[in-house]
Amino acid sequence: MRWNIDPQSLAETILQGDRLALARACTEVENDSAAGEQVISTLFQKSGKAHLVGITGSPGTGKSSIVNQVAREYRLRHPDSRVAIIAVDPTSPFSGGAVLGDRVRMRDLVGDEQVFIRSMATRGALGGLSRQTTALALLFDCAGYELVIIETVGAGQSEVDIVRLAHTTIVVEAPGLGDDIQAIKAGIMEIADILVVNKADHPGVEATERALRSMLEMAQGRIRINTGHHGGELGMTGKSIQTSPAVAWMPSVLRTVAIENKGTREVVDEIARHRVWMEINGRWSAKEHLRLRSDLVNRLKDQLFDHWLGKFTESQLEGMVEQVMARKKSPYQAASELLSKV
Amino acid sequence: MRWNIDPQSLAETILQGDRLALARACTEVENDSAAGEQVISTLFQKSGKAHLVGITGSPGTGKSSIVNQVAREYRLRHPDSRVAIIAVDPTSPFSGGAVLGDRVRMRDLVGDEQVFIRSMATRGALGGLSRQTTALALLFDCAGYELVIIETVGAGQSEVDIVRLAHTTIVVEAPGLGDDIQAIKAGIMEIADILVVNKADHPGVEATERALRSMLEMAQGRIRINTGHHGGELGMTGKSIQTSPAVAWMPSVLRTVAIENKGTREVVDEIARHRVWMEINGRWSAKEHLRLRSDLVNRLKDQLFDHWLGKFTESQLEGMVEQVMARKKSPYQAASELLSKV
């Protein structure tokens, strides 16, 4: 059943806590529809309060169990709060739907009306996953959700992009997952605010912890000598200490056995501690600025393209693609030529 | 040392087989520079011959060893050919460089002047990885490389985007890598042309193979009922069989022990077989069309944005970001307002 959407009344219904209305708005936002934009624009002034927590790591580390326990513990501590979970599943570029969602693991949270779980159905758009995820997080923020957990499976480039836009990034590891994982950790290590060794009852936990600490040192060393603008954004560098009064955040390494709910309370403590640190050191608004600017720029790019495309017919664009196919023009030359006609 | 670049003479030097010139052009292309574009535009009419093979899978499956053996075997069979390997490493968004490259594993290929290995250093651009990789693949195609292997570590959204643009996609699995990997496979399974179970001397190989086959059946079933346009692009659907005479490609499941060079010759056979199938069924040019169109559209988006940005000062854009930060406007409203001033 598809009913007519009045974004204004949809927004009001969401504020009243209607979960069906929120689910509907999620779909609109994922579909990049005008209605989704209007719902967010209507509620936007209420946003800016949510703590966005990204959680990532290799397959098999038990991220979902940690998300489960963190959400539960947070709700126990803050009975009036709402928690949203965005599970970014690797999905089919064809079917447009999540294949094996993480919902099934979230049994502990079922029945808690203040927890909203959304499994992302990506549409395979180039660079679209990260954009959709931030838009969805913004919607939850607008709807009064105070904790928004973004769980990404794997640690590819999109995943790094997604967690870069969160306030707090948790990287999860588990003992005995093989050598290749080292390479993946290296990339993500530099954006980690909290490190968790899950399945800490398994053999090899000391070795994993040791490896994490030494990679952390490597990463910190590399950040310290990097004098580019990125360091300043996150304030973890020697450089940014010179230019701002920020005290560096030192990621801690925590052990958990999430399925037995061991050590997860300390994770929630650490998330809270990181939030306080961010607020004191001006990092909260720096992150916000980075994310909103990136939202704005992406939106501009899309709208410019749509606007421009309206001046041409599909067959004109297709004709240029044919010339590229025939090797008469390179894609660069074709783009310049099309643009020169505007 | 940074010397002046004359794209025209750089292009000529590349055609003479100069590896240093090619490496230099790779850097220009990765940096998205005007010189990089000009080199590709100069050589573009020579392109369209390279077979782009994407290889992906979870960490620990031994992808690099397979790439190594496939490149070696291909060179043995085609002594006059050139092979390029693009290793897309998960890298730091800060350092701008690959942290642990796959080069170290490629010992067998060292000394073969006709094999060129490039480890991708991504710059953390949203959606940029996939764009850079296709541009690099196009450069190798222009430079006369007949086989271009793109190895992606992990299986996130960017990785799916990357391999979607290859002619042939190989998905690698290994026994005993845990449950969560199933979820990852599901997303990538639908774009797999060849499935490889590596480390086939390890226990559990039958179970892995069985799981792969059943996921393959699931994926094929899902593709068959999907009547959208995506199916038609790849011609693996019931729908596209009705609209085109293409015979469906049935991905086979091959076993390898790559570090002992067992089974890798069959992988090379299968790659060749897939190429022939594509050419006969019009899929080769369909893939080409999809990739070049996507190149052109992305280029247009970037150029439109650059052109538009030139009309504003950075402080005007920044002023709008501040209004968004102050919750006076949503990112959508801000984008529309900025655009209306053009």
Image (tube, coloured by chain):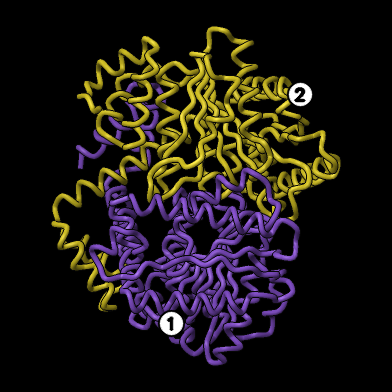
Chain colours: A purple, B yellow
Which residue: 31% across, 47% down? Answer: A309
In the depicted structure, whether residue B100 falls above or below residue B82: below
Which residue: 49% across, 70% down? Answer: A53
Q: Which residue is mark 1?
A: A11
Which residue: 49% across, 74% down? Answer: A25
* Left or right position of B247 against B142: right
Residue B192: % across, % down:
66, 38
Circle 1 residues within 10 Å: few <14, some 14–19, many ≥20:
many
Circle 2 residues within 10 Å: few <14, some 14–19, many ≥20:
some
Indicate which label's residue lies in the foreground, 2 or 1: 2
Residue A69: % across, % down:
65, 76
Q: Which residue is mark 2?
A: B262
In the depicted structure, whether residue B185 falls above or below residue A18: above
In the depicted structure, whether residue B140 falls above or below residue B301: above
* Left or right position of A29 against A57: left
* Chain of the residue where label 1 is placed in the rendered structure: A
Element class at badge 2: loop
Q: Nearer the viewer, residue A269 or B88?
A: A269
- Hey, what amino acid is under mark 2? Lys
| Residue B152, visible in the rendered structure | yes
Q: Nearer the viewer, residue A321 or B146?
A: B146
The C terminus of chain B sits in image quarter: bottom left
* Left or right position of B100 against A39: right
Which residue: 48% across, 84% down? Answer: A14
Residue B18: % across, % down:
37, 14
Q: Quadrant of residue A74?
A: bottom right
Q: Nearer the viewer, residue A31 or A263?
A: A263
- Hey, what amino acid is under mark 1? Ala
The N terminus of chain B sits in image quarter: top left
